[in-house]
């Protein structure tokens, strides 16, 4: 009974250790994937290359990178050379020599004089230190670093608004120019180019122009807001992929296309007609005024029609 119980306990403990290790791997994958997402959307760099799985994999002469792209080198006391059983003074000199080479980044001499990592006299406590550091910092280590990512900051949304302004304002200016020419011609044709009617129409044209510029500015901000919403939605979608356990390599493969698509300016719709009310009815008004002038001219020339007397 006792033996079976012990065996079962060992099995349970082994399974628990395996599950903890798997959880650790999954959490590191999620952190790595999220750091990629954050770099693409916030700007910055992220770690790439191979993951360092344990202390034995660390090269003390090499620079590694955390998922956020920060440089990392192992504390030199993790790799203190073994004195080989000699006296403390000799070991101290050897360690001092090693540390000077380490600080200078002289990898070749370190490897020539002290051998590879496995010969540097590391103790089991160093592996525990590494794992403890990884647990405390919630970071992993990787061998390479990505290129700098642009991210989507306020300047990106300002550029989207500016792109719309560059698209819409020339259309407003063209409409305004055409409306001004049509108005001047119509007023001249109607013979009221210097009248109060002309002044009122010109004031209407100026008001319509200001309103058009204000509307375009609002639409430009709307384009920026739409871009911000699209970026937020894509970021959430990619973060959801990370949380669901997607492989970081798939995340890394999809992110460039997502970012490029978000950076493309959309096909803006043509602006509306802002000045039609100013010139609408101008021809009809001119015709009415012409008819009135013709009637007045006829009365002046021929007099008013005589009324017929009931006694005639």
Image (cartoon, grey):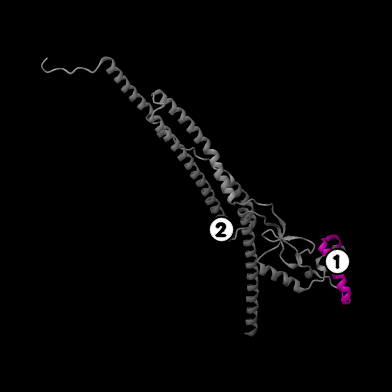
Looking at the picture, tell me which residue is in the foreground, 97 or 169. Answer: 169
Question: Marks 1 and 2: in contact by CB < 8 Å?
Answer: no
Q: Is residue 301 left or right of residue 47?
A: left
* Residue 59, placed above or below residue 180: below
Q: Which residues are magenta?
A: 83-109
* SS at circle 2: helix
132 inside magenta stretch? no
Outermost residue, left direction? 311
Q: Residue at x 52, y 51 (%)?
A: 229
Q: Which mark is residue 200?
A: none
Q: Residue at 63% of width from left, 70% of height from top?
A: 20
Name the spot of residue 178 as percent of width and height, x first: 47, 30
Task: Please state the horizontal and vertical placement of residue 11, each as a whole percent of the image.
Answer: 64, 76
In which quarter of the view is residue 279 placed?
Answer: top left
Mark sitting earlier along the chain (2/1): 1
Residue under label 2, please give it. 240
Q: Secondary structure at mark 1?
A: helix
In this view, the residue in front, 190 or 280, is 190
- Neighbour tally class for label 2: few under 14, some 14-19, many 20 plus, Cα within 10 Å: few
Horizontal placement of 196 versus 123: left or right? left
Seen in the picture, residue 9 relative to 214 is either above or below; the reply is below
Residue 88 belongs to magenta span: yes
Which quarter of the figure has residue 74? bottom right
| Quarter in which the C terminus is drawn | top left
In depth, the one of 198 and 4 nearer the eye is 198
Could you say which quadrant of the image residue 23 lies in? Answer: bottom right
Dominant secondary structure, magenta:
helix
Mark 2 and mark 1: Cα distance apart in space: 47 Å
Q: Nearer the viewer, residue 169 or 61?
A: 169
Residue with the mark numbered 1: 114
Q: Is residue 270 above or below residue 224?
A: above
Percent position of residue 88, x then y: 87, 76
């Amino acid at each position: 009974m006792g033996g079976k119980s012990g065996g079962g306990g060992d099995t349970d403990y082994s399974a628990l250790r395996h599950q903890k290790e798997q959880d650790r791997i999954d959490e590191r994958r999620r952190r790595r994937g999220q750091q990629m997402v954050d770099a693409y959307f916030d700007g910055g760099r992220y770690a790439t290359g191979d993951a360092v799985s344990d202390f034995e994999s660390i090269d003390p002469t090499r620079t590694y990178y955390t998922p956020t792209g920060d440089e990392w080198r192992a504390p030199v006391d993790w790799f203190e050379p073994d004195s080989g059983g000699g006296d403390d003074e000799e070991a101290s000199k050897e360690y001092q020599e090693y540390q000077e080479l380490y600080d200078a980044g002289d990898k070749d001499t370190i490897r020539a004089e002290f051998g590879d990592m496995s010969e540097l006299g590391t103790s089991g406590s160093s592996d525990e230190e590494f794992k403890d550091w990884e647990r405390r910092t919630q970071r992993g280590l990787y061998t390479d670093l990505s290129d700098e990512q642009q991210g989507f900051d306020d300047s990106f949304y300002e550029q989207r608004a500016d792109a719309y302004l560059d698209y819409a304002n020339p259309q407003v200016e063209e409409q305004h120019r055409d409306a001004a020419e049509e108005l001047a011609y119509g007023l001249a044709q109607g013979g009221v180019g210097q009248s109060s009617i002309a002044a009122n129409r010109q004031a209407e044209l100026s008001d319509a122009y200001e309103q058009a510029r204000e509307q375009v500015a609002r639409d430009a901000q709307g384009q920026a807001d739409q871009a911000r919403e699209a970026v937020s939605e894509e970021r959430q979608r990619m973060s959801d992929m990370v949380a669901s356990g997607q492989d970081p390599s798939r995340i890394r493969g999809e992110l460039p296309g997502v970012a490029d698509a978000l950076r493309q300016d959309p096909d803006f719709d043509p602006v509306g007609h802002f000045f039609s009310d100013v010139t609408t009815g101008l021809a009809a008004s001119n015709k009415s005024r012409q008819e009135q002038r013709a009637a007045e001219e006829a009365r002046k020339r021929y007099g008013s029609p005589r009324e017929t007397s009931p006694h005639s």
